Image (tube, rainbow, N blue to C red):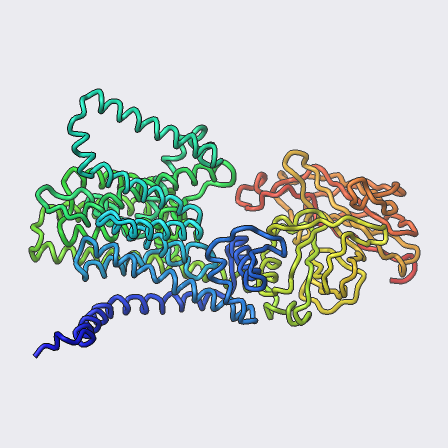
């Protein structure tokens, strides 16, 4: 007898059935999460700077004070990711917190499998939806899951938003629309690019209104002039929107008005990289499947999915074009696949729709194939490894590095892969759905897609791991040596000419005691804001303002008049006990590899050495050496630089920076390639300063294109004090 009178007993079988049905989805989640967690565990240090450093500063500040800040300076509204990661810094150890943060991001990004399943389940049976969800969580973009950036949380939130938008369009209600809008807002809070989700939602609601019965009746009475007026109003609305966006967004204004030609190019590259990373076929089949065959029953869910997909494709691809074009004008030209990774769940759900209910119409296949073949073969063959902006291109690096393929062979292979994908799409269109041949071909295609995509993901993640290991190799160990030496006391970093700040970034990351970043020449801006260039308060080397920290970490040619606590390589930790920073000596303008450099305009390299503490020196000389021994091209390419050296007592210039009060000695000498030269200068009895200039500079890359160094080099500089007696 069925216990219909007992509600609790009748609900229980339903609960168990639902739990059992969820087991395959949970198995996919935990299986993929285990893989990505293992990948993250082999990623020893951050590498994407200053993004990871800034996110860490914000989340640490939230953990400590409840408010986001960077090096103590208030920030405003931080990304949602900073708030999500804040609790991990309560663990105390930076290493443990970093490992936990990576695990949190892995679990969050892998959770994309759940909304991806819900999105596909709107239009296909559960096993097809499970395959689409697994594929959407096996894409190359999952290589971001071990990196402290926004994508690991933005990806699942964007997928959740797309699912909720489609649900709201399928069965509209105020509650469903509000839920979709709320998740769109959360996604935008995570990554501002995802504001395009609101465009998807608005376009979907406009479609709902357009297809509603009252509007249908109203449209039925329109004349040709009414239609012309409606089209004119629509175009006017588009132009007004573009003008508004141009007012609000510099990237929109500059690209849409000045660089229109680049928008299409960068959009094509982004979509092409996405297609390459997921095996090409999902782009052809996924787009074609949105044009459902005639005679197929049009359910509200299918219509809502198609409208959501079309709106998402348009919005994300347009954004990728705008963003890529703008960045190419102000920074560098890259393939920005990471701006369209959010389309992968849509494409896989649409591919599942094609496999389950038949591929789209013939004209849709032709259009989708033409577009796919174009974008796949328009992407530049980028063999950089890893390539953070487009992990989908890791499969090209795999072909080059592991298979030994040339760029030409890879280019040809992409054409072949595109044509094979087209052939599969055409075959699926011609074969009868439900036949054995259709099932076998669709099954083989599905397996090939997931295998291709997962191979790309694994290789992309391996590239990020290799880079992380290489960076960690040069980092002093233990990573938290400053924290151990200070017992958590506050530290200011003081350096100059910080051209390669990687070790400083990582030292700050693993040592929360580092609170401030200063430089003597303004180059600390290269390690992220906020920074400070202190003023010279007195000629004895006292700087102002006082940093208010317990310790100072001096790097790259800076030495202080303070007790030394410990040192690692060229970095020296001094005790300040809250007092001012007082320089002992500083060599400003010399790179970490000891070369002094100039600009391509002036072709003059300048540097200065200032000796503030002369209490134990006595009479002597300043020994100034310049060398080009490290640059020795063939005789026909060799050059000569003229060096001018001046010395005098330290003064304070009008900019509150050190200067020569009066010149007491001057020397000029030649520095030839392959050789070194130098001079002796008499030193004053008070703190003194040497200023060095050498011209013309040279660029190794301009002289020999096989050299990667594009800097304008003057020479390797060394300045020291030589006592007159002894020493």
Numbered marks: total: 0
Asked whether, in this view, residue 544 is left or right of residue 394, the answer is: right
Q: Residue furthest front?
A: 5
Along the line of sight, the residue nearer the viewer: 623 or 474 = 474
Rendered location of residue 48, percent (x, y): 50, 55
Along the line of sight, the residue nearer the viewer: 514 or 10 = 10
Instruction: Determine if residue 460 is in view.
Output: yes
Asked whether, in this view, residue 327 is left or right of residue 428, the answer is: right
Instruction: Determine if residue 377 is in view.
Output: no
Rendered location of residue 697, percent (x, y): 67, 39
Quarter holding residue 6: bottom left
Asked whether, in this view, residue 301 is left or right of residue 665, the answer is: left
Along the line of sight, the residue nearer the viewer: 707 or 417 = 417
Which residue is at a point 16% across and 32% down the rendered structure image? 217
Quadrant in the picture for the N terminus: bottom left
Rendered location of residue 659, percent (x, y): 81, 43
Which residue is at a point 58% across and 56% down the rendered structure image? 502
Along the line of sight, the residue nearer the viewer: 38 or 188 = 188
Q: Residue furthest bottom?
A: 1
Which residue is at a point 53% across and 44% down the rendered structure image? 706
Rendered location of residue 374, percent (x, y): 29, 39
Quarter holding residue 106: bottom left
């Amino acid at each position: 007898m069925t216990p219909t009178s007992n509600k609790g007993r009748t609900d229980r079988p339903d609960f168990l059935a639902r739990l059992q049905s969820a087991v395959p989805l949970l198995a996919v989640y935990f299986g993929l999460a285990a893989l990505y967690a293992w990948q993250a565990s082999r990623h020893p240090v951050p590498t994407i700077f200053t993004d990871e450093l800034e996110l860490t500063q914000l989340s640490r500040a939230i953990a400590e004070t409840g408010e986001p800040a960077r090096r103590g300076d208030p920030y405003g509204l931080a990304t949602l990711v900073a708030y999500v990661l804040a609790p991990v810094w309560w663990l105390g150890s930076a290493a443990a917190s970093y490992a936990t943060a990576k695990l949190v991001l892995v679990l969050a990004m892998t959770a994309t499998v759940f909304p991806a399943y819900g999105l596909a389940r709107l239009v296909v049976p559960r096993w097809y939806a499970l395959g689409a969800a697994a594929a959407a969580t096996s894409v190359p973009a999952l290589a971001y899951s071990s990196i402290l950036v926004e994508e690991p949380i933005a990806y699942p939130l964007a997928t959740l938003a797309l699912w909720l938008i489609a649900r709201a369009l399928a069965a509209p209600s105020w509650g469903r629309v509000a839920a979709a809008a709320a998740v769109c807002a959360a996604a935008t809070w995570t990554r501002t690019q995802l504001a395009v989700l609101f465009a998807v939602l608005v376009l979907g609601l406009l479609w709902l209104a357009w297809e509603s019965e009252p509007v249908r009746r109203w449209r039925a009475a329109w004349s040709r002039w009414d239609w012309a007026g409606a089209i004119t109003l629509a175009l006017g609305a588009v132009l007004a929107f573009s003008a508004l966006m141009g007012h609000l967004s510099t990237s929109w204004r500059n690209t849409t008005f000045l660089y229109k030609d680049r928008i299409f190019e960068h959009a094509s590259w982004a979509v092409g990289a996405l297609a390459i990373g997921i095996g090409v076929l999902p782009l052809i089949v996924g787009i074609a499947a949105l044009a459902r065959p005639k005679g197929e029953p049009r359910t509200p869910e299918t219509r809502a999915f198609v409208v959501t997909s079309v709106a998402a494709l348009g919005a994300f691809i347009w954004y990728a074009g705008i963003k890529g074009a703008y960045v190419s004008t102000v920074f560098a030209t890259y393939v920005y696949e990471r701006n369209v990774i959010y389309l992968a769940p849509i494409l896989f759900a649409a591919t599942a729709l094609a496999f389950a209910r038949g591929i789209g119409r013939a004209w849709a296949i032709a259009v989708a194939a033409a577009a796919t073949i174009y974008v796949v073969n328009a992407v530049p063959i980028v063999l950089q490894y890893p390539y953070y902006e487009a992990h989908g291109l890791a499969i090209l690096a795999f072909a080059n590095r592991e298979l030994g393929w040339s760029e030409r062979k890879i280019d040809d292979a992409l054409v072949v892969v595109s044509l094979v994908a087209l052939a599969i799409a055409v075959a699926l269109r011609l074969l009868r759905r439900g036949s054995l041949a259709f099932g076998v071909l669709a099954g083989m295609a599905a397996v090939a897609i997931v295998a291709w995509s997962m191979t790309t993901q694994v290789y992309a993640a391996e590239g990020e791991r290799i880079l992380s290991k290489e960076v960690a190799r040069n980092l002093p160990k233990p990573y938290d040596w400053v924290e151990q030496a200070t017992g958590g006391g506050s530290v200011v970093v003081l350096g100059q000419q910080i051209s390669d700040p990687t070790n400083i970034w990582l030292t700050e990351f693993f040592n929360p005691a580092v609170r401030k970043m200063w430089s003597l020449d303004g180059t600390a801006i290269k390690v992220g804001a906020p920074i400070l260039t202190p003023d010279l308060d007195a000629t004895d080397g006292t700087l102002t303002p006082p940093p208010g920290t317990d310790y100072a970490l001096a790097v790259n040619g800076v030495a202080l008049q303070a007790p030394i606590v410990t040192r690692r390589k060229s970095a020296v930790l001094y005790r300040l006990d809250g007092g001012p920073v007082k320089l002992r000596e500083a060599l400003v303008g010399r790179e970490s590899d000891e070369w002094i450099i100039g600009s391509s305009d002036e072709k003059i390299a300048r540097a200065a050495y200032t000796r503030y503490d002369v209490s134990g020196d006595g009479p002597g000389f300043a020994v100034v050496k310049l060398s080009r021994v490290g640059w020795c091209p063939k005789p026909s390419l060799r050059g000569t630089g003229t060096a001018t050296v001046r010395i005098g007592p330290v003064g304070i210039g009008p900019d509150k920076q050190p200067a020569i009060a009066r010149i007491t000695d001057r020397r000029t000498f030649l520095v030839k390639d392959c050789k070194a030269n130098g001079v002796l200068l008499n030193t004053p009895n008070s703190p003194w300063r040497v200023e060095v200039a050498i011209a013309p500079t040279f660029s190794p890359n301009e002289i020999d294109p096989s050299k990667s160094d594009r800097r304008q080099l003057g020479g390797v500089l060394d300045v020291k004090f030589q006592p007159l007696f002894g020493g």
